[in-house]
Amino acid sequence: MRISKNDYYLNIALECSRRGTCLRRNFGAIIAKNNQIVSTGYTGAPRGRANCCDLGKCRRIELNVPQGERYELCRSVHAEMNAIISAPRWEMIDAIMYINGIDVETGATVMPCLPCEMCKRLIINAGIECVITPSGLYEVRDWVWDEGKDKYNLR
């Protein structure tokens, strides 16, 4: 039985996540446009820096930082960021990003599987139209709003 396109790309993103080097959670990201993969990315330290899995430690784990907080302490570049860095902007305009991730300790798929606020800003600026994760489909335009104004900038 043939799988859907979304499942196909989510499976590839999951496979990319297996290259991740984080000791907590690893993600993979795929940018696709016109049914072609434009770029891929996974969680890992910047080029030339040691990965957490190679060091055998994570500063955020050592400091007991909750998930979703204090990303400035993290050595890793997120999968979404790496996929965006590796793609030309003109190929990302109106593209779809697929994100999937695994919890290192349990091996389970991360749910909900959503980009952090930093990655959302990069996704918006890249011109990506929507993000698809195992948690669902997210329209990037829904992330574009300013504090003090309503969500859709109608005021």
Image (cartoon, rainbow, N blue to C red):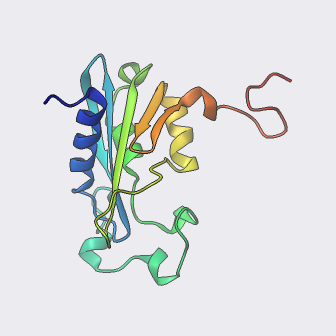
The quadrant where residue 21 appears? bottom left
The quadrant where residue 89 appears? top left
The quadrant where residue 34 appears? top left
Q: Position of residue 91 (x, y in %)?
A: 35, 21
- Tell me if residue 78 comes above or below residue 57 in the rendering: above
- Tell me if residue 101 comes above or below residue 83 in the rendering: below
Q: Residue at x 45, y 38 (%)?
A: 136
In this rendering, the count of numbered labels is 0
Viewer-side residue, 57 vs 131: 131
User: From the image, which quarter does the C terminus lie in?
Assistant: top right
Seen from this angle, which residue lies furthest bottom?
62
Q: Position of residue 107 (x, y in %)?
A: 28, 65
Seen from this angle, which residue lies furthest left?
1
Seen from this angle, which residue lies furthest front?
1
Q: Position of residue 11 (x, y in %)?
A: 24, 42
Q: Residue at x 22, y 56 (%)?
A: 19
- Tell me if residue 5 comes above or below residue 65 in the rendering: above
- Tell me if residue 147 comes above or below residue 19 in the rendering: above
Viewer-side residue, 147 vs 6: 6
Horizontal side of residue 23 vs 130, given as left or right: left
Q: Residue at x 27, y 58 (%)?
A: 20
User: From the image, which quarter does the N terminus lie in?
Assistant: top left
Q: Position of residue 71 (x, y in %)?
A: 53, 62
